[in-house]
Image: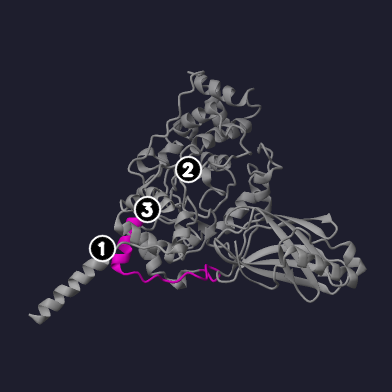
């Protein structure tokens, strides 16, 4: 997988810990339900932070399992949907991804299948105290 | 004199251009390598517990050629999937008891698929095997007839017992067992290595001498193939991503008749009691069943048809889901002259006419022809000696 661009950078682990610590100071509720350790891919917005790891690494034609952590700036975040879309082709994936909460702000999404090579948008819908929000990461799979 | 010299120089330059070795850059090389290695391992089918059972494979082979599964004893699976025609019928559209509106696909490499049939109405090779047996238009058989056929033949009964153990408890169980045996046989039919595979492996190893044995026209065609975006759909070692696309082929097979393609296939799949979520699956809770549970209809499914493998394409004319093109050249021309008005509003938005020159069409055809092996094997499994 090649990440062509992303709405947020992927920090090194040390930097990630600093970010998580800062979030904990700002929001006690988030500190309880926000563990992004070990999740290398990261997307941030003004109100939420999401990180994930795909198994196997994102590629074409196989179902993936994503381990996902979601944090809100103020309170807890709940992952409600994971999907993918090919903007250049005007279509998404043909499969519904199944999501289960695994605790401490962590989620497991099963069944993401990218059926073509090319540019995809990974779309994560989260609910936070600020409302529902979509975090998007643009990736290139070969 | 000067004009003649200029003409000679132009001719020499043109000849040199044609003969120039084809170079593949890093991105092209990466894309080419994705089409191998070949052959791949056939993925396990946990919904069919006899998928790799030698007795079941032999039982399936015999049933595949058995005309007594049909209504009047004149049609077998092999009637339309004929070995001599690369396991197709060679006709534009299938026709046994009644004419159908789709082309008969080859069963070569069918075991590598995710969905089966042009519309993906089946989620396993065994569920797909049931469809023609029961279809009044195709074989016109029944569960009871299949059960009688197996029970009335000592050799088939022996193979069925060796495959499944105790006798089937119902006619429907006997039908499912027959279909699972046929699927076990069909899954053994992986097409052989081809000139392309030799080139692809040589490219992976940087073996210029071996690469040079691949015809120049095929190399130029391959460069066009990966450069024009064909692998977006014809992806991977089997040259198919196993999914469904609208490529501008009309989906009205006759006046007043509409072929809904994937849109209809998903409805058939959901209603099929033989799907991987149903009572006859040997793994209704596993990952294979999860794919069926997770597949979803989208507004783009209408008029989409499964992307066929390009392996052995030179042997499997005619082409497209309705068999409208008699030759590979005609099929390539389809993409060269693509009629954008025929694309469904939600069709592939990247599709554009390729506007190929005649020589480019020649090269693409040469490449496609290189995806066929010099000869197909008979796919006769080793005899199962414990049964007559």
Examine the structure image and report whether residue B365 is included in the region drawn in magenta.
yes
Distance from the alpha carbon under mark 1 to that under mark 2:
50 Å
Q: Find numbered disc 3 in the image and state the secondary structure of the residue it sits on.
A: loop
| Between discs 1 and 3, the one toward the N terminus | 1
**Residue closest to the eye, B149 or A55:** A55
Distance from the alpha carbon under mark 2 to that under mark 3:
19 Å
Q: Is residue A52 above or below residue B112?
A: below
Badge 3: chain ID: B
Magenta residues (range): B344-367
Any part of residue A78 in sight = yes
Residue assigned mark 2? B138
Mark toward the viewer: 2 or 3: 3
Mark toward the viewer: 1 or 3: 1
Residue assigned mark 1? B19
Residue drawn at x 56%, y 63% as measured from the top left: B302
Q: Quadrant of residue B220?
A: bottom left
**Residue closest to the eye, B131 or B2:** B2
| Between discs 2 and 3, the one toward the N terminus | 2
**Mark 1 on the same chain as mark 2:** yes
> In the image, B25: left or right of B9?
right
In the image, which disc is placed on residue B318?
Answer: 3
The colour scheme used to paint the residues is one colour
Can you name the residue that lies furthest to the front here?
A14
> In the image, B300: left or right of B92?
right
Q: Find numbered disc 1 in the image and state the secondary structure of the residue it sits on.
A: helix
Residue drawn at x 68%, y 39% as measured from the top left: B283
């Amino acid at each position: 997988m090649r990440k062509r661009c992303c709405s947020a950078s992927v920090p090194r682990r040390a930097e990630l810990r600093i970010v998580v610590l800062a979030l904990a100071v700002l929001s006690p509720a988030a500190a309880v339900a926000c563990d992004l350790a070990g999740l290398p891919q990261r997307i941030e917005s003004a109100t939420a932070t999401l990180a994930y790891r795909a198994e196997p690494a994102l590629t074409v034609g196989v179902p993936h399992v994503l381990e996902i952590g979601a944090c809100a700036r103020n309170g807890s975040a709940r992952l409600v949907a994971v999907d993918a879309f090919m903007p250049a082709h005007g279509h998404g994936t043909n499969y519904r991804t199944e999501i289960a909460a695994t605790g401490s702000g962590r989620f497991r999404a099963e069944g993401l299948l990218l059926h073509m090579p090319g540019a995809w948008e990974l779309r994560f819908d989260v609910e936070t105290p600020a409302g529902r929000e979509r975090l998007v990461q643009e990736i290139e799979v070969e | 004199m000067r004009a003649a010299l200029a003409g000679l120089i132009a001719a020499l330059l043109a000849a040199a251009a044609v003969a120039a070795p084809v170079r593949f850059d890093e991105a092209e090389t990466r894309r080419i390598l994705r089409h191998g290695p070949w052959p791949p391992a056939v993925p396990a089918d946990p919904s069919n517990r006899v998928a790799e059972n030698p007795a079941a494979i032999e039982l399936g082979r015999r049933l595949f050629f058995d005309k007594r599964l049909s209504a009047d004893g004149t049609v077998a699976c092999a009637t339309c999937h004929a070995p001599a025609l690369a396991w197709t019928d060679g006709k534009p559209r299938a026709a046994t008891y009644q004419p159908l509106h789709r082309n008969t696909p080859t069963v070569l490499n069918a075991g590598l698929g995710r969905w089966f049939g042009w519309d993906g109405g089946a989620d396993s090779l065994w569920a797909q095997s049931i469809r023609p047996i029961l279809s009044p238009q195709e074989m016109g058989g029944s569960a009871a007839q299949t059960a009688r056929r197996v029970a009335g033949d000592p050799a088939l009964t022996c193979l069925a017992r060796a495959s499944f153990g105790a006798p089937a408890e119902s006619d429907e169980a006997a039908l499912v067992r027959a279909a699972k045996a046929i699927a076990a046989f069909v899954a053994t039919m992986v097409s052989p290595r081809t000139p392309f595979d030799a080139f692809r492996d040589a490219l992976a190893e940087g073996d210029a001498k071996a690469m040079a044995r691949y015809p120049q026209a095929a190399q130029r065609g391959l460069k066009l193939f990966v450069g024009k975006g064909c692998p977006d759909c014809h992806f991977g070692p089997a040259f198919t991503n196993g999914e469904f696309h609208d490529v501008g082929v009309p989906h009205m097979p006759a006046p007043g008749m509409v072929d809904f393609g994937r849109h209809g296939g998903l409805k058939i799949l959901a209603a099929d009691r033989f799907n991987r979520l149903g009572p006859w699956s040997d793994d209704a809770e596993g990952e294979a069943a999860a794919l069926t549970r997770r597949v979803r209809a989208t507004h783009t499914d209408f008029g989409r048809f499964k992307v066929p493998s390009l392996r052995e394409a030179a042997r499997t004319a005619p082409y497209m889901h309705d068999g409208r093109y008699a030759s590979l050249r005609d099929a390539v021309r389809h993409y060269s002259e693509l009629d954008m008005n025929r694309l469904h509003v939600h069709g592939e938005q990247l599709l554009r006419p390729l506007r190929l020159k005649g020589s480019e069409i020649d090269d693409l055809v040469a490449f496609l022809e290189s995806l066929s092996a010099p000869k197909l094997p008979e796919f006769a499994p080793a005899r199962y000696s414990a049964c007559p």
